Image (tube, rainbow, N blue to C red):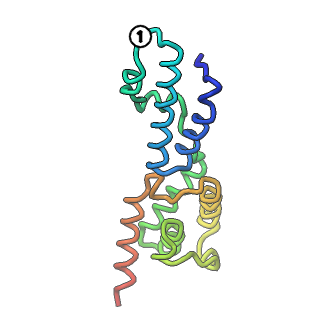
Amino acid sequence: MSRERPILRPMMDTLRRAIEHGTEDELGVAILRLNDAKALLAALAGDPAGETLPDVQARTITLAELQAMCPPPAWMQAEEAAALERLFAIAQSDTGQARRAARFLLAWWNAGRFGGFNLTDLWGVDADVARDMHTVFGLVARVHRYPDTLGFGERLQAIARVRLDREEEP
């Protein structure tokens, strides 16, 4: 069992927050600060391996070590993932509901560029699709992240290209 030194606890909390909600820059800074703190503690404690502070500072935390210290949050539940997949499938199709599903997803990604989602569009989708939108809306409210930061950037770009092409047709 791993013991977390009390002095590292605030840094570990910062690192966890950076993993869950931060940018890459914030995560990098948190890792550097944690490495510095670990190096200082090792040097002050007279590291049993006889490493000096510069030796300890030269080491970095590997991705595996970082993941072991701060496992990624279960940011998406199975029902949310299924609802999102169904909405992506509909948005990429050529059905009457495709435009509405695409607008919903694109509004999450970049409402300023692609326009917001008109709530009355819910009237034009099947009840199952409306439930999926409701589920994804809950996901958006909970994770506080844009979909491209969660790995959906390429899929959204493809939907945006198709939507923009269709809107330009006479």
Please give the name of the residue rendered at 37% of the width and 21% of the height, measured from the top-left corner: 55
Which residue occupies the foreground of this view, 133 or 59?
59
In this view, 21 is above or below 57? below
Give the quadrant of the C terminus: bottom left
Please give the name of the residue rendered at 57% of the width and 47% of the height, measured from the top-left corner: 76
Query: Which x, y percent locates residue 167?
Result: 39, 83
Which residue position holds label 1?
A: 50
Which residue occupies the foreground of this view, 164 or 128?
164
Please give the name of the residue rendered at 55% of the width and 39% of the height, measured from the top-left corner: 15
Which residue occupies the foreground of this view, 58 or 142?
58
Query: Which x, y percent locates residue 3?
Result: 61, 19
* Horizontal arrangement in the rendering, residue 52 relative to residue 124 (left or right): left
- Tag 1: residue type? Gly
Query: Dot 1: within a 10 Å radius of its alpha carbon, few (fewer than 14), some, or many (20 or more) residues?
Result: few
* Horizontal arrangement in the rendering, residue 139 relative to residue 112 (left or right): right
* Horizontal arrangement in the rendering, residue 70 relative to residue 89 (left or right): right
| Label 1: element kind | loop
In this view, 17 is above or below 165? above
Give the quadrant of the N terminus: top right
Query: Which x, y percent locates residue 8?
Result: 59, 29
Please give the name of the residue rendered at 49% of the width and 36% of the height, measured from the top-left corner: 33
